Image (spheres, rainbow, N blue to C red):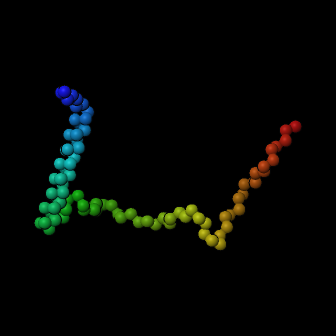
């Protein structure tokens, strides 16, 4: 019995070529970085930008639990009642 051959779709072939190209580019970058490290040169693409300042984490982390010994501030809005308003 002869085996059936299914035609490869155009989109599948395109995806495979993109993956292959991406892997080739990554391999080339890694080889260039290894060569630069061996030569004692800075690795391309790893230098920090000179015109940007490092981000400082000055915002305190938001805790989900209240700090012990503190109470929430009283609300200035009128309290809602559970009783329905009577219509006349």
Residue 50 image point, x, y percent = 28, 62
Residue 63 versus residue 12 in the image, above or below: below
Residue 52 versus residue 5 in the image, above or below: below
Residue 49 image point, x, y percent = 28, 60
Q: Residue furthest right?
A: 88
Q: Residue at x 24, y 30 (%)?
A: 9
Q: Quarter of the image holding residue 66?
A: bottom right
Residue 7 visible, this angle: no
Residue 16 image point, x, y percent = 22, 40
Q: Quarter of the image holding residue 21?
A: top left
Of 47 and 10, the residue lying toward us: 10
Quadrant containing the N terminus is top left
Quadrant containing the C terminus is top right
Q: Is residue 6 left or right of residue 57?
A: left
Q: Is residue 56 left or right of residue 26?
A: right
Residue 69 image point, x, y percent = 65, 72
Of 59 and 52, the residue lying toward us: 59
Residue 43 visible, this angle: yes
Q: Residue furthest bottom?
A: 69
Q: Is residue 54 left or right of residue 24?
A: right
Residue 15 versus residue 30 in the image, above or below: above
Q: Residue at x 24, y 62 (%)?
A: 47
Q: Residue at x 24, y 61 (%)?
A: 46
Q: Residue at x 55, y 64 (%)?
A: 63
Total count of labels: 0
């Amino acid at each position: 019995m002869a085996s059936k051959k299914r035609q490869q779709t155009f989109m599948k072939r395109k995806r495979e070529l993109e993956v292959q190209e991406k892997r080739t580019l990554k391999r080339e970058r890694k080889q260039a970085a290894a060569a630069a490290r061996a030569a004692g040169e800075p690795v391309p693409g790893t230098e920090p930008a000179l015109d940007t300042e490092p981000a400082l984490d000055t915002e305190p982390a938001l805790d989900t639990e209240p700090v012990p010994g503190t109470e929430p501030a009283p609300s200035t809005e009128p309290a809602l009642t559970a009783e329905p308003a009577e219509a006349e």
